[in-house]
């Protein structure tokens, strides 16, 4: 027989809920304990309220919750859920919630409900615990919770976070009531790992299903376009935003600036920027970085002064923009000025800023200064910085430093093929063939695999990917034919292939063929087949542009009368009538 009425218990529960903080909670809890109220069995409800307050309220105390929880002989599912959720909130990166869930199952007193599974899945996503999450997935079937929208959304987010998109798709197909959140989760998941066609395909599906996307989804889609350089789709998405009257807030507008800049349409990016009513640091910085990657140094630096005039505080992204603008154009004086301006505005230089300065000094031929700059860095330089120095070494022939730099680089990144290729090329340039073969042996011994060059081009809303000497594209035969024609015209114009950028032990003819099949050239050839003037051919490459392809594409732009824009890992190259916007400075 319960000693107290339900009304009394409800009263206590509402007192707990209204607690301003732990002090009051402790007082209530203490009074209940002193009066032996909590020892009567119906009060598990009150206890679970105490646990939930301590574990979940922003003014709570998870450790207090834990103590109360540990004293309960048979906690109900509500208390388990509070503890699991509470732990994943306070210790975002820990596996504690998963351990608690295991304890719950093995206790045998409480079965999980859909909330339990959703909370555990969230914890699994936080730490990308793939196999644990999969187990939870199987439990969803076991406990008949697989059609709960909470569980399904949890599974989708979990698989998207773990980049297990096949499984995510599987879950997705099972959802009968595809709500907006689940869509969005998939799109961001795809966008995050650069599976652009999938992300955009889903977006289209979403529209066919008559769902109207919100700003968050649009930002995901626009970033997917930016990543792939999918300009046509990006443009279409922009007009969709306008048509549907979706509010272009700061974040959305900034995403659009980034997308247009990354897709090579800097004028459009500027238009979006100019049309903004209100601009924050990120909006200004994105525009400055955009100008910088396009080699529009004056615009970048002018915008920076305008930003300062508008009393908007620059941050580390802003300075990255102005410093890289200087690096791309070799203006050492300005670069030094901004470097000290950054210190004056209290922005601590990060690795990337040091990288920009080293790049700037090396490009300007000031290798010695770059080297001592690196030696004075307050933290150990990363591989990118050593690699930049090494490339600077090549130009300036500082062979004594070269060995030291190479050692640092290979110690930091023994598995990065780019380092071995760079070193081999330097040795080959100096005809040190013994060192070249040593490099190749070392590479083999360490099991280093070369990252293949990969270029993509968007044709009619579909992104085509080309990987160096990969035959999988269905129209490869036509592309090879086109390449032959291109080679002929390029050779007739007097160009000799720079075969030194290919490793030395293939003979000259093979070397030339190897160059012809570089991914950027495959993509440009495909663009020539599939489009006509005045369509601009836009290609995105994952690595740095190869020197020979750069020359050849200059010639193509003249011979075929086409404007070609190639975005490589570092910047944009815009080829018009035989010249490139980078003025061969890259
Ligand atoms: Zn090439
Ligand atoms: Zn160029």
Image (cartoon, grey):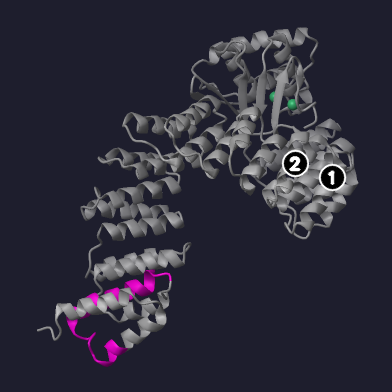
> Quick check: 352 left or right of 367?
left
As for residue 39 lying within the magenta part, the answer is: yes
Q: Is residue 409 visible?
A: no
Q: CA distance from mark 2 to mark 1?
A: 24 Å
Marks 2 and 1: which is nearer the front? 2
* Majority secondary structure in the magenta region: helix
Res. 103 image quadrant? bottom left
Q: Disc 2 or 1, which lies upstream in sequence?
A: 2
Residue at the (59%, 10%) spot, across then down: 532
Question: Which of 504 and 167 lies nearest the eye of the viewer?
Answer: 167
Any mark on residue 324, and which?
2
Q: Residue at x 41, y 40 (%)?
A: 214
Q: Residues within 10 Å of mark 2 (few under 14, many from 20)?
A: many
Could you tell me residue 35's position as x and y percent?
24, 92
Along the line of sight, the residue nearer the viewer: 119 or 315? 315
Whether ligand 2 has any atom under 8 Å from the Cβ at mark 2 is answered as: no
> Residue 477: which disc?
none
The x, y position of residue 450, in whole percent, is 64, 36
Q: Are marks 2 and 1 in contact (CB under 8 Å)?
A: no
Q: Secondary structure at mark 1?
A: helix
* Image position, residue 558 (x, y; %): 73, 12
- In the picture of the structure, the residue carrying the numbered disc 1 is 402
Closer-to-camera residue (351/32)? 32
**Res. 397 in view:** yes
Relative placement, left or right, of 574 versus 218 is right
Q: Which region is colored magenta?
A: 31-58
Disc 2 element:
helix
What residue is drawn where x is 41% and y is 83%?
23
Q: Nearer the viewer, residue 347 or 458?
A: 347
Residue 239 location, x and y as percent? Answer: 48, 28
């Amino acid at each position: 027989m319960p000693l107290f009425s339900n009304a009394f218990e409800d009263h206590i529960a509402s007192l707990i809920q209204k607690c301003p903080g732990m002090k009051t909670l402790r007082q209530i809890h203490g009074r209940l304990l002193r009066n032996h109220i909590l020892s009567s069995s119906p009060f598990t409800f009150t206890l679970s309220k105490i646990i939930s307050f301590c574990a979940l309220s922003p003014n709570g105390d998870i450790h207090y919750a834990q103590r109360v929880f540990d004293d309960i002989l048979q906690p109900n599912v509500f208390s388990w859920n509070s503890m699991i959720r509470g732990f994943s909130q306070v210790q975002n990166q820990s596996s504690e919630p998963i351990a608690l869930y295991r304890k719950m199952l093995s206790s045998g007193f409480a079965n999980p409900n859909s909330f339990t599974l959703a909370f555990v899945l969230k914890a699994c996503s936080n730490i990308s615990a793939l196999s644990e999450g999969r187990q939870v997935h199987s439990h969803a079937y076991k406990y008949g919770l697989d059609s709960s929208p909470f569980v399904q959304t949890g599974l989708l987010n979990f698989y998207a976070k773990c980049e297990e998109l096949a499984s995510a798709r599987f879950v997705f197909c099972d959802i009968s009531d595809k709500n907006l959140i689940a869509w969005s989760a998939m799109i961001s998941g795809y966008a995050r790992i650069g599976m652009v066609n999938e992300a955009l395909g889903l977006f289209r599906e979403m529209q066919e299903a008559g769902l109207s996307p919100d700003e968050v989804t649009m930002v995901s889609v626009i970033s997917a376009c930016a990543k792939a350089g999918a300009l046509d789709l990006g443009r279409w998405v922009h007009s969709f935003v306008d048509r549907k009257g979706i509010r272009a807030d700061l974040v959305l507008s900034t995403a659009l600036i980034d997308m247009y800049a990354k897709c090579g349409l800097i004028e459009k990016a500027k238009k979006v920027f100019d049309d903004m009513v209100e601009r924050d640091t990120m909006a200004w910085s994105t525009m400055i970085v955009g100008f910088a990657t396009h080699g529009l140094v004056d615009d970048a630096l002018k915008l920076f002064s305008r930003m300062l005039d508008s009393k908007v505080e620059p941050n580390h992204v802003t300075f990255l923009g102005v410093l890289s603008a200087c690096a791309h154009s070799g203006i050492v004086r300005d670069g030094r000025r901004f470097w000290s301006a950054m210190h004056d505005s209290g922005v601590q230089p990060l690795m990337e800023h040091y990288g920009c300065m080293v790049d700037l000094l090396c490009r300007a031929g000031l290798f010695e200064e770059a080297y001592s700059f690196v030696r004075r860095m307050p933290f150990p330089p990363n591989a990118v910085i050593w690699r930049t120095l090494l490339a600077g070494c090549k130009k300036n022939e500082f062979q004594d430093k070269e060995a030291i730099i190479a050692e640092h680089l290979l110690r930091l990144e023994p598995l990065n093929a780019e380092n071995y290729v760079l070193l081999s090329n330097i040795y080959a340039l100096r005809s040190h063939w013994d060192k070249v073969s040593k490099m190749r042996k070392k590479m083999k011994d360490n099991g280093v695999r070369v990252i293949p060059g990969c270029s993509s081009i968007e044709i009619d809303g579909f992104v085509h990917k080309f990987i160096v000497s990969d035959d999988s594209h269905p129209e490869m035969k036509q592309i090879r034919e086109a390449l032959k024609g291109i080679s002929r015209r390029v050779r007739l114009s007097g160009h000799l292939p720079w075969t030194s950028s290919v490793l030395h032990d293939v003979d000259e003819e093979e070397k030339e063929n190897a160059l012809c099949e570089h991914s950027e050239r495959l993509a440009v050839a495909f663009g020539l087949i599939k489009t006509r003037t005045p369509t601009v051919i836009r290609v995105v490459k994952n690595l740095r542009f190869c020197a020979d392809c750069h020359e050849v594409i200059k010639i193509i732009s003249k011979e075929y009368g086409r404007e070609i824009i190639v975005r490589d890992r570092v910047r944009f190259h815009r080829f018009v009538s035989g010249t490139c916007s980078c003025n061969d400075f890259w």
